[in-house]
Amino acid sequence: MKEFDVIIIGGGQSALACAYFLRRTDLSYTILDDQSLPGGAWQHVWDSLTLFSPSEYSSLPGWMMPKSESNFPSKDEVISYLTVYEERYKIPVCRPVEVKAVHHTRHSFELDTSVGGYRCKALISATGNWHHPYIPEITGRGEYSGIEIHSAYYKNADNLKGKKVLIVGNGNSGAQILAEVSKVASTVWAVQKAPEYLPDEVDGRVLFDIASAKYHALQAGKEFDAKQYSLGNIVMVPSVVDARERDVLHYRKTFHAMTPTGVIWEDGNSEDFDVIIWCTGFKPAFDHLKSLDIMDDQQQIETTETESNAIPGLYLVGYGNKTGFASATLIGVGRSARNTINQITAYLKQTK
Ligand code: FAD
């Protein structure tokens, strides 16, 4: 059994941000990541995905992302940044190590992993959500015999030339994939509610500033109204602007059932599709924590900021606003990571 004061599960941007603050303490720690290479989920995103903000708004604590070739850094530039960040700060990452289950005993955690047992006093889960693509339950789904792809596995439109493709989901993934696929295939966009677009000049910078203003307002016990720019709205990256100019950003209200060859729309008409691309989001990758029996019916874990309400010493970092404002972004996770390491330091002093 290998022992550390703190173990971080996951080797993406959230894990690295936590490691940055841990290395300033005298605590022993390691990262366990199930991937063979650095970069976390960025290794798997589609080829043309870029960040929503310029590099100076996309940095982890301590070291700025180098300036990008273009306005918004590409996925390869993000992976390269995360790879060099690990090396620069000599962050100890064990790869590939999958954490299969976590057990809690008084003041310690025991981890079953693909390479044997680990033990620690405080545990950070930073596993993101890429392992858990979500597709809604739809009548007849099992009977559809065409090709289904979740955005988690979509790479590019090379194999879709000349096909009839249904894209499902009104978020940024749906809009960006529609923009790309519509250049080579006939597309229909199915959405639950009408997509809302940000003004062309609003990118991740503005969204992050809003998230920060909201954070500070709530900390000060004030109300905050961000109605004008909802964080879930579609960012007008160049590919989506181009799709608007080609007049392909049409959508229709989603279908209610599937057939062996396509879907049945709300009005009862059916339509056939060769391919369906699900851009319907993700759920947190919490499989390794199931053994702790702390998940609710929605498969969520209750926390106060990042600390588990049920188990002291367990922290969840990077899972979005529920575990810290903007914590699912490169620039936002730093604040969450710093607070978490401060809390861990205090917790370990108190349980000594
Ligand atoms: P991940 O990057 O998913 O890393 C988690 C790691 O943990 C992975 O390596 C995973 O394999 C590993 N893991 C999981 N389970 C286990 C286990 N049991 N044992 C061991 N290892 C495990 N973010 C931005 O900052 N700026 C943007 O502009 C931006 N744009 C985006 C656009 C789109 C369309 C999408 C879909 C996402 C965007 N993101 C952006 C978000 C970003 O991609 C993710 O939020 C980010 O990768 C999350 O980082 P993470 O470290 O929390 O998780």
Image (cartoon, rainbow, N blue to C red):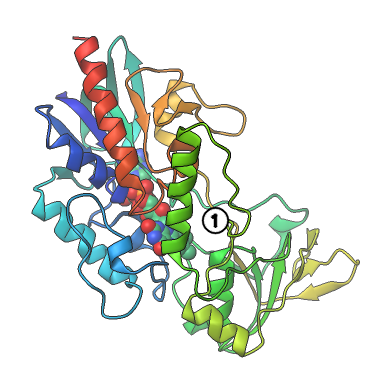
Q: Between residues 156 and 193, which one lies in front from this camera angle? A: 193
Percent x, y of residue 126: 34, 40
Q: Secondary structure at mark 1?
A: loop
Q: Is mark 1 within 8 Å of ligand 1?
A: no
- In the image: residue 303, left or right of residue 166: left
Percent x, y of residue 121: 23, 20
Q: In which quadrant will I find the C terminus?
A: top left
Percent x, y of residue 72: 35, 73
| Residue 196 location, quadrant | bottom right
- Kind of residue indicated by mark 1: Leu
Above or below: residue 146 compared with residue 296 = below
Q: Which residue shows up at 23% across the image and 49% down it?
A: 61
Q: Which residue shows up at 29% across the image and 20% down it?
A: 109
| Residue 149 location, quadrant | bottom right
- The residue most toward the right is 268
- In the image: residue 287, left or right of residue 3: right
Above or below: residue 81 compared with residue 238 = above
Q: Which residue shows up at 75% across the image and 66% down it?
A: 260
Above or below: residue 290 compared with residue 157 = above
